Every structure is written in C-alpha cells, then in structure tokens.
Amino acid sequence: MSAEGLSLSRLELTQRITAHAVQPRLSPLPRVRNIIAVGSGKGGVGKSTTAVNLALALAADGARVGVLDADVYGPSVPMMLGLNGRPDSPDGKSIEPMRAHGVEAMSIGLLVDQDTPMIWRGPMATGALTQLLNDTRWGELDYLVVDLPPGTGDIQLTLAQKIPVAGAIIVTTPQDVATLDARKALKMFEKVEVPVLGLLENMAVHVCSNCGHAEHVFGEGGGQRMSAQYGVPLLGSLPLELSIREHGDAGTPVVVGQPGSPAAKAYRTAARQVAAHLAMRPRVTPSISASLL
C-alpha cells in the first residue's frame, strides 16, 4: 500500500521524568524527583543567572520546576525572577513557595529586607538553608534547581552533604583562573559523592550587535580543556550578551523575556543536555519513586 498522498493528522508526544539516585545515606526530598545543584569555584561567573535560565528552560520544555536560592549572603534569585513581598505560611511552620514565570521559588532574600546583611557564621547559614529546603511546601516537582553559593568553603561543603542531590553542574568562564577554581568545585562534589553532570561554560563568546564580529573576551576553549582533562561532559557554551544582564535585572530572564534570541536558545540547548545526562544516571528504586508522587 502506497503512503503517497497521506498526511499525519495528529502526533502526541509525552515525557516521563523519573527520580534518580542521590548520595548514600540521604533520602530523596518528598514530592521532588530530582535536585540539581548549580555551583562554581568562584563568584562572578554568572552562576545564578545560569541557574535561573536553566530552570526556566526546563519548565519551557514541559517539566515542573522549582528554584532554591542557597546563596545566603548574596541572594539574587528574587530580583531575577521579579519576586516581591513575603511568602505565605499557612500553619506557621511551613512556607508556600512563591511563583514566577511558571516555576516555584524560595530564597532567604524573600524573608528579610533587601538591604539587610546576613551576618551569620557557617553553621547558622547552613541550618537556615536546610530548614528552608525542607520546610518549603514544594509542589510535585520534576526538578529543583539549587543555586549554591560560590566557592568551596564550609557552607558549600555542608550543603552538598545535607541536600539529596541527583546531579551537579559546574559553571565556569573560559579563562584559566576561572577553570582553576572550577576544578576545586569538581573535586568538592566528588568528595561528597555527588555526581557531576557536566560543565557549563558561561560568557564564552561575545557577538557585536553592530557588526556581528565574534570575540572571545575571556579566552577560548577553557571549558573544553577542563572537560577533556577530567572526563566530564561540556554541556554547553553560553554567550556574553547585554540582553542577558538586562532581562535578569528586569525580573524577566532572557529565556522568557526574549525566547527567540540566540541566548535563550543556548540556555534551552544546555538545559536539554542537563536533562539528558541526568536521565542516564541510576534511578531510585520503584518503592522510593512511588513515595515521591
């Protein structure tokens, strides 16, 4: 029988995002299938911007996504998502996450005044953040993206040990001094038995909006060299663009504020790589998976 002249009248695609294994001795968070930690060895590499846009890109592909801002000393997620006010507490013990652009979000920055500095020692900070993670009334999430503080100190190490992470992403910029610190973040995750899904090279190339000339402002190939040296995937290279900063400052990250732009497409491509590499990780047992639903 010839198929000539026939046309497809309907096509349905479905997705099933399963829960994946976490560190030994830790149990998955109820109602959250997968926690993805986004870290960096140093500040200033665009980690928070990357975390927020990755979360929105995952949501744009149909996943149920939340964002936890774990940077207690410099919380930036509320501004990037355009969140204001205080979250509700229906019972005085738990907290309702706030919502923006289709994702749930929680941050210490939503619980204190914007100008209030968090003058806390490490144990106080990690205690507050683990409580924030566990006491937030997250919905049924496929992914919870955790924006970790920069660096590899006590706070980062303790959080990585206490949060049941399915996989981690390391954000770096191409120059050698940034990849040097990113290597330390990689070793930190290895120390606490958190699988590293891969690297994301941020600010990899700048394309002039006037003439179209591409320039590698912070060097070239640093992420690729680190990927090859340590045997971890390079999940993507993200551009250095003015629009990324502008949309982040305005509370409409570029993935939702300018979805057709090359920058938004780069984030969506990277998010799909993250999801694909996580999907290849070992899954939790069926009994535990059922408890997450």
Image (cartoon, helix red, strand yellow):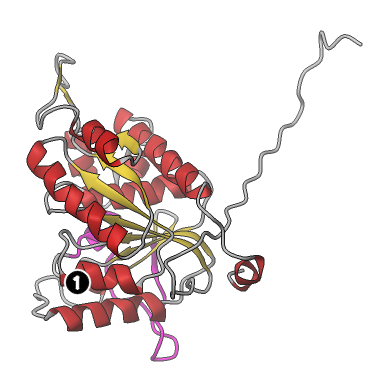
Residue at 39%, 90% in the rendered image: 93
Q: Which residue is nearer to you in this view: 22 or 231?
A: 231
Residue at 11%, 49% in the rendered image: 44
**Quadrant where the N terminus lies?**
top right
Q: Which residue is nearer to you in this view: 261 or 291?
A: 291
Q: x, y (%) of residue 82? A: 28, 58
Q: Quadrant of residue 107?
A: bottom left
Q: x, y (%) of residue 282? A: 53, 55
Residue at 15%, 59% in the rendered image: 151
**Quadrant where the C terminus lies?**
bottom right
Q: Which residue is mark 1?
A: 155
Q: Tag 1's secondary structure?
A: helix
**Magenta stretch: helix, strand or loop mostly:** loop
Q: Is residue 9 left or right of residue 64?
A: right
92 drawn magenta: yes
Q: Quadrant of residue 292?
A: bottom right
In the figure, 61 relative to 18: above or below?
above
Q: x, y (%) of residue 288? A: 60, 71
Asked whether residue 238 is in view, the answer is: no
Q: x, y (%) of residue 289? A: 61, 66
Q: Which residue is nearer to you in this view: 178 or 244?
A: 178
Residue at 76%, 23% in the rendered image: 8
Q: Which residue is nearer to you in this view: 188 or 59?
A: 188
Amino acid type assigned to the residue bearing label 1 in the image? Ile
Q: Which residues are magenta?
A: 75-99
Q: Quadrant of residue 179?
A: top left
Asked whether residue 31 is in view, the answer is: yes
Q: Is residue 258 left or right of residue 117?
A: right
How many C-alpha atoms fall within 10 Å of the one at disc 1: few (<14), some, or many (≥20)?
Answer: many
In the figure, 250 relative to 13: above or below?
below
268 drawn magenta: no
Report the number of numbered marks.
1
